Image (cartoon, rainbow, N blue to C red):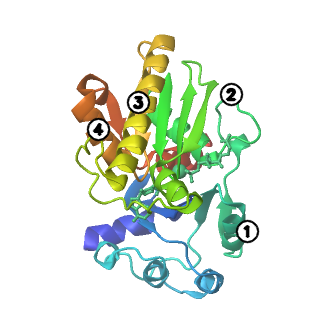
């Protein structure tokens, strides 16, 4: 415990928060080192409004649900821990700005060129983080609430991308917008579902999953056509499921994918450390 304490005294402690459309993604940094990363649900506004009152980082972390055993050695540190925020949910951005030490990341802080003004900050940061870690050209696939593809060329210039409803959203839409289709749960789809379903649930699972995988494969092939040595990184809550399916159906594609849940935090770290 002691070396950890000494280290934390030397290095600046800061929190990174990415607000997605389903949940919050957190990272605790000691200087340049990502100490811990975790996900939580959205927090009640009343909790957020009182976060600044906590005197120790432990108290604060308890409120934002960092699994307590990991935070054991981080007691009695600075009040008002800096919070670096990247959000694609404007109503949530507004609530989190009530915490006094919040710094909101904006597109102009990311040195990618060729971006358009409404590009999602999560897409830009993940692309920047991935490119800085593994090199450009880079394609990032984000298997989140939405499924997104975002690419940059060797000159770190945005090539563009695509946005479609993600896995959970596709099941939810069918369940909510039809008269007699059930809401299909996400469990039981980790291993290959039958291609030709013999009941309604199997038919929905097959339709959604196999067309999503076919779409991902098609975008990847188009990407390699454009940039034969282009790298691909995949992130987001459904990344493991998609990777498992790709491994089973198209192992040569799966073998070239970099799976990394923390791409956005690598992007944020670049901005904190190098100003981009
Ligand atoms: N505990 C969880 N809560 C919510 N979504 C989850 C969870 N675990 C896996 N997922 C999957 O993650 C997807 C959302 O991805 P995520 O990257 O968390 O979204 P976002 O960044 O858009 O908030 C959902 O489609 C869901 O299938
Ligand atoms: C496409 C997104 C909704 C993805 O959000 P997520 O699924 O990760 O919560 C988000 O990046 C966004 O709101 N983008 C703005 C539009 C654009 O990127 O062109
Ligand atoms: K995201």
Q: Disc 2 designates what residue?
A: 113
Mark 3 vs 2, N-terminal side:
2
Which type of secondary structure does the marked residue at label 1 adopt?
helix
- The disc at residue 195 is 4
Q: Are marks 1 and 3 in contact (CB under 8 Å)?
A: no
Which type of secondary structure does the marked residue at label 3 adopt?
helix
Q: Which one is in front in this view, the residue at disc 2 or the one at disc 4?
A: 4
In this view, the residue in front, 203 or 134, is 203
Mark 2 vs 4, N-terminal side:
2
Query: Can you name the residue that lies furthest to the right here?
Result: 117
Please state the horizontal and vertical placement of residue 235, each as a whole percent of the image: 42, 45
Q: Disc 3 designates what residue?
A: 214
In this view, the residue in front, 47 or 59, is 47
Q: Marks 4 and 3, Cα distance to the nearest angstrom?
A: 12 Å
Please state the horizontal and vertical placement of residue 185, each as a whole percent of the image: 37, 62
Mark 2 vs 1, N-terminal side:
1
Up/down of 78 relative to 114, above or below: below
> Residue at 35% across / 42% down in the picture?
242
In this view, the residue in front, 275 or 166, is 166
Q: Disc 1 designates what residue?
A: 94
Q: Which one is in front in this view, the residue at disc 4 or the one at disc 3?
A: 4
Q: Marks 2 and 4, Cα distance to the nearest angstrom?
A: 42 Å
How busy is the neighbourhood of tag 2: few (under 14 within 10 Å), some, or many (20 plus)? Answer: some
Q: Which one is in front in this view, the residue at disc 3 or the one at disc 2?
A: 3
């Amino acid at each position: 415990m002691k070396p950890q304490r000494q280290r934390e005294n030397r290095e600046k402690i800061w929190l990174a928060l990415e607000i997605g459309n389903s949940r919050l993604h957190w990272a605790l940094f000691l200087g340049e080192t990502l100490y811990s990363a975790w996900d939580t649900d959205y927090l009640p506004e009343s909790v957020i409004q009182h976060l600044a009152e906590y005197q120790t980082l432990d108290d604060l972390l308890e409120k934002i649900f960092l699994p307590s055993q990991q935070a054991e050695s981080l007691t009695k540190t600075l009040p008002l821990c800096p919070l670096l925020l990247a959000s694609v949910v404007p109503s949530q951005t507004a609530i989190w700005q009530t915490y006094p030490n919040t710094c909101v990341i904006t597109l102009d802080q990311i040195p990618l060129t060729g971006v358009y003004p409404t590009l999602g900050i999560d897409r830009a940061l993940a692309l920047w983080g991935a490119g800085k870690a593994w090199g450009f050209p880079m394609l990032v696939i984000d298997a989140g609430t939405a499924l997104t593809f975002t690419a940059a060329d060797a000159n770190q210039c945005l090539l563009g991308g695509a946005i479609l409803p993600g896995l959970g959203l596709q099941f939810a839409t069918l369940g909510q917008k039809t008269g007699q289709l059930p809401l299909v749960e996400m469990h039981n789809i980790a291993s290959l579902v039958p291609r030709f379903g013999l009941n309604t649930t199997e038919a929905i699972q097959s339709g959604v999953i196999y067309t999503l995988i076919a779409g991902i494969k098609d975008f990847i092939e188009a990407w390699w056509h454009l940039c034969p040595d282009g790298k691909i990184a995949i992130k987001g809550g459904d990344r493991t499921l998609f990777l498992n399916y790709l491994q089973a159906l198209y192992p040569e594609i799966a073998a070239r994918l970099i799976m990394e849940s923390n791409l956005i935090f690598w992007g944020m770290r670049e901005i904190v450390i190098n100003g981009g």
